[in-house]
Image (tube, rainbow, N blue to C red):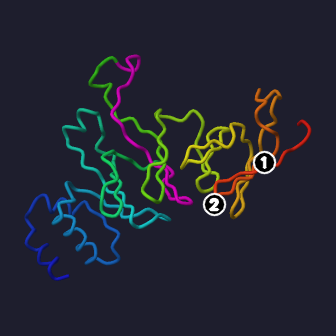
Amino acid sequence: MKQYTDFYKTMIGNTQFEEILANTTFGGSTAIDNLHKICMEYVLGQTQSPKEVVYWKKGGPKNIEFRPAYLSEEYRKKWNVSKSLKYLEIWMDGRKIDNKLYRFGWNDEWSEGYISILQAREAYYESHITKKIKEQRHLAEHKTILNDQGKIVFVNEENYLRDELSQVKGFIWKRGKTVFNIETNFIYTNFGDKFFTSDRYAFIEIAYAGNKYNNSENEENGVLQIDCVSGGSTLFVRSGRR
């Protein structure tokens, strides 16, 4: 590690490097590991501004990194981005997966191969909120799901969800009463109610068709068993009405 400590010594007095050093937190196990990573980031030109580097999130693959994105003062001013907001880039195997901006939300831990984050997009508030163009500019945040293969599998095109999106098990997700495969967008049912899971399966109670709760005659009543490995499903039909 002597080469890195020597490099560090030569950089003392370099304003940009000292800012990086003062504002960077790495996941190294020792101080010298951290110094090594700081120097490598600087030498390789990957560090463009003072930043806090998160190398991985709990429960996720270690080849996927969330690195803070550099936003110039000019850009922040134009799009009314507070300095307190920290936006991220997603890197996998040393490469950015795209050129978009992301931010961690309130639930940002990996769960069964997926993590929920927010994708930021340039947007304008409607005129009834403010008529001044300068004040209309902002970064709208869209709920986004990333899988452990570095693929964005879901982006909510609105900047809010009418029905909360939640994970049932693995790639099986639920939005309102719609149960679907988040990898393929295949919809298992639009009338999913309560559910429970086992090691391999998800069991979804299907709302009774044709009653006061919905007008569908296309779905049978019962419990839908979904194989969370193969994606296949089986409906166990329930007779009678609720």
Residue 11 image offset from top left, x and y in percent: 10, 68
Residue 192 in the image: above or below residue 5: above
Circles 2 and 1: CB atoms closer than 8 Å? no
| Residue appearing at x 50%, y 58% in the figure | 109
- The extreme right residue here reads 240
Q: Residues within 10 Å of mark 1 (few under 14, many from 20)?
A: some
Closer to us: 29 or 208: 208
Q: What is the quadrant of residue 169 in the picture?
A: bottom right
Q: Amino acid at mark 1?
A: Leu
Locate residue 136 relative to residue 111 in the image: left or right.
left
Locate residue 181 relative to residue 215 in the image: left or right.
left
| Residue appearing at x 76%, y 29% in the figure | 216
Q: Residues within 10 Å of mark 2 (few under 14, many from 20)?
A: few
Q: Secondary structure at mark 1?
A: strand
- Report, in whole angstroms, how far the alpha carbon at label 2 lies from the one at label 1: 17 Å
Q: Secondary structure at mark 2?
A: loop
**Range of residues picked out in magenta:** 106-130
Q: Which mark is residue 50?
A: none
Residue 23 is a magenta residue: no
Q: Which residue is mark 2?
A: 229
